[in-house]
Amino acid sequence: MITISKKIRNIADFPKKGILFRDITPLLQDATSLKEAIDLLVGHYQDRKIDLVVSAEARGFILGAGIAYRLGVGFVPVRKPGKLPYEVNRVTYELEYGEDSLEIHKDGVNKGDRVLVFDDLLATGGTARAMCQLVQELEGEIVGVCFLIELTSLKGREKLKGHDIFSLIKY
């Protein structure tokens, strides 16, 4: 775990002044750290009978697909509007500075599918809550909501009450 956290690079004032960005690129570049992160995330869920991993673009795709592969389950992408080619469900959610939307294919999750929702970072919780809403609209069962990094001071967990939440690294 120490190896992984040392691979997170801090970038001040990105994407705007006053924000400390947690860059996972160095972790992704290091094969040992990347494997360790995926193995630790998978280890938390390997006995939970998961059918699908649902994850949002872009960095969530990278680790989310690896988690799905290691669990031996399918992967369902959640994207910004207009990026998915088939019929979609859309949810719009509040950001600290406006609003955003996410979409999922209408056939991405089936009724009763046991779903692990993954994102690289839990900040304010808006993106994760939107993904959960999309899964629930398709009648999937959320087994857990999982993150590589959690920024605890932003209290994103509060938007995810009622879900099993796991974060590998907390700041």
Image (tube, rainbow, N blue to C red):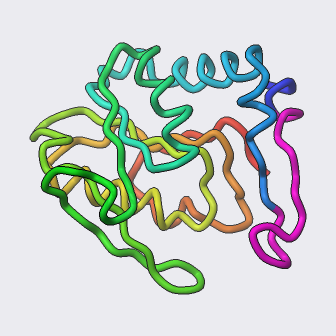
* Along the viewing direction, whichever of 83 and 33 lies nearer the viewer: 83
Question: In front: 72, or 151?
Answer: 72
Quadrant of res 160: bottom left
Q: Residue at x 50, y 23 (%)?
A: 66
Q: x and y percent of residue 67 in the render?
A: 48, 24
Q: Residue at x 67, y 25 (%)?
A: 37
Q: Position of residue 110 (x, y in %)?
A: 12, 39
Is residue 44 shown above or below 98? Answer: above
What's the residue at 13%, 36% (across, down)? 112
Q: Is residue 19 magenta?
A: yes
What residue is at 89 percent from the left and 33 percent from the top?
A: 6
Vertical position of residue 161 compared to residue 142: above or below:
below
Say which quarter of the image contains residue 116.
top left
Is 17 placed left or right of 145 in the picture? right
Q: For this view, does 50 lie left or right of residue 30? A: left
Q: Position of residue 8 (x, y in %)?
A: 82, 40
Magenta part of the protein: which range? 5-20
Image quadrant where residue 16 sits: bottom right
Residue furthest left as drawn = 111
State which quarter of the image contains the N terminus: top right
Q: State the residue in front, 87 or 76.
A: 87
**Residue extending furthest toward the bottom:** 98
Tally of marks: 0
In magenta segment, residue 112: no
Q: Position of residue 120 (x, y in %)?
A: 60, 44
